[in-house]
Image (cartoon, grey):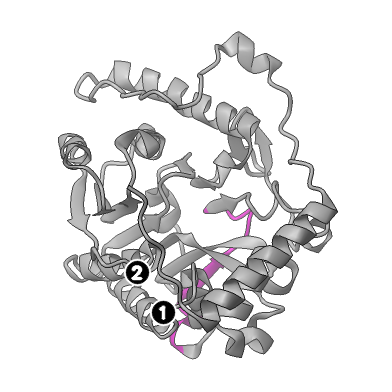
């Protein structure tokens, strides 16, 4: 089986995605790594190439990177053999815990696409609810009670993923004033006859990807509506009930103590991996990345507790976000770039 891993960067430096790459290398993954790049410095391109990462330019238009990445992903997938597997995921908030090849090898051949559950429905997740109502209100009745699936942790056969990516782009282009609507488009598409029967809709405990933004960091009023049992997070890693690890751990950076623990876990494995393989470049740890505590310090890090939210503040923020989204939907606003 041939597997490619694809990430994307827009106005990012290498240090902001280095944990993504290092964690992937530590799993023993030996396939090709690709990066869809937009608005990055030439030095960043050189750093990616030095590490053997294939770079692909993303459309330099001002349209959202979350949509344009699917345009570039479509083109990349069309350049690959249609039966190659492609793992397309976010870069700044995902770490790999296991080589995804193993999961894909043992998956039923009935499926050619894989997505990860957020364990909550559109109607019970504040962000997804507002986003869907503003972006695709015509789909609200159909999707409101449906489980939300994440658009930043997808896998698929290259031919099928190219087809899905193209459809996501086409639907998003129909709503040019909407924002971050790639996930809503993907969720609607995957429930249509064209894709439904070839998609593996994984749960939080299936071992593919755990998305903790909507679970660990769910707001108090959202948590009673979580629909699935959740994995165990300890020492910065995400464990399944059998003690194994999920392939991908998503949104680990949403809380400082969890981010610190997860980054330390990656750095610890990376140092051991780099010693074992002298051909691996020395890790770059740019200024501004989290402090890596010693193992003794790690024992003193308290168990991660979700951030406490003020209901009044959340309500005010939600009202403001809804107002802004409505204004943008009614009348496009062009923001001037600050120099």
| Residue at the extreme top | 296
Q: CB atoms at circles 1 and 2 under 8 Å apart?
A: yes
In depth, the one of 136 and 163 nearer the eye is 136
**Residue 65 percent across, percent down from the top left:** 36, 62
Indicate the quadrant where residue 137 lies: bottom right
**Which residue: 76% across, 56% down?**
314
**Residue 128 percent across, percent down from the top left:** 63, 68
Rate crowding at label 2 as few (under 14), some (14 to 19) or many (20 or more) other CA atoms within 10 Å.
few
Q: Which mark, residue 63?
A: 2
**Residue 14 percent across, percent down from the top left:** 30, 36
Residue 201 lies in the magenta-colored region: yes
Rate crowding at label 1 as few (under 14), some (14 to 19) or many (20 or more) other CA atoms within 10 Å.
some
In depth, the one of 275 and 54 nearer the eye is 54
**Which residue: 47% across, 45% down?**
94
User: What's drawn in magenta, residue-wise?
Assistant: 194-208
Q: Is residue 312 above or below residue 318?
A: above
**Which residue: 19% across, 50% down?**
55
Q: Is residue 163 above or below residue 120?
A: below
* Secondary structure found at label 1: loop
In depth, the one of 167 and 173 nearer the eye is 173
**Residue 183 percent across, percent down from the top left:** 51, 69
Residue 209 lies in the magenta-colored region: no
Indicate the quadrant where residue 27 lies: top left
Q: Which residue is mark 1?
A: 176
In the rendered view, does 171 fall on the left or right side of 221? left
Sooner in the amino-acid sequence: mark 1 or mark 2:
2
């Amino acid at each position: 089986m041939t597997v490619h891993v694809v990430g994307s960067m827009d106005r990012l430096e290498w240090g902001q995605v280095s944990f993504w790459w290092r964690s992937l290398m530590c799993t023993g993954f030996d396939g090709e790594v690709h990066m869809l790049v937009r608005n990055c410095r030439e030095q960043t391109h050189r750093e990616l190439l030095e590490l053997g990462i294939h770079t692909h330019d993303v459309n330099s238009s001002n349209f959202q990177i979350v949509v344009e990445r699917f345009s570039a992903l479509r083109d990349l997938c069309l350049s690959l053999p249609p039966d190659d597997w492609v793992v397309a995921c976010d870069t700044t908030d995902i770490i790999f815990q296991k080589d995804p090849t193993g999961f894909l090898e043992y998956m039923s051949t009935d499926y050619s696409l894989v997505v990860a559950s957020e364990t909550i429905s559109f109607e019970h997740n504040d962000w997804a609810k507002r986003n869907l109502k503003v972006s695709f209100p015509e789909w609200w009745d159909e999707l409101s009670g449906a489980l939300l699936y994440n658009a930043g942790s997808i896998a698929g056969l290259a031919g099928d993923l190219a087809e899905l990516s193209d459809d996501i782009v086409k639907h998003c282009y129909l709503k040019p004033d909407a924002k971050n609507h790639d996930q809503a488009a993907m969720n609607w598409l995957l429930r249509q006859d064209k894709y439904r029967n070839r998609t593996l809709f994984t749960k939080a405990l299936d071992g593919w990807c755990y998305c903790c933004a909507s679970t660990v960091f769910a707001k108090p009023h959202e948590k009673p509506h979580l629909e699935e049992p959740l994995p165990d997070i300890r020492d910065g890693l995400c464990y399944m009930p059998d003690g194994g690890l999920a392939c991908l751990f998503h949104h680990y950076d949403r809380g400082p103590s969890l981010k610190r623990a997860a980054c330390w876990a990656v750095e610890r494995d990376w140092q051991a991996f780099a010693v074992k393989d002298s051909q691996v470049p020395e890790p770059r740890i740019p200024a501004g990345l989290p402090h890596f505590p010693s193992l003794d310090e790690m024992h003193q890090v308290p168990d991660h507790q979700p951030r406490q939210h003020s209901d009044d503040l959340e309500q005010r923020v939600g009202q403001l976000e809804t107002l802004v989204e409505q204004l943008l939907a009614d009348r496009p606003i062009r923001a001037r770039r600050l120099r």
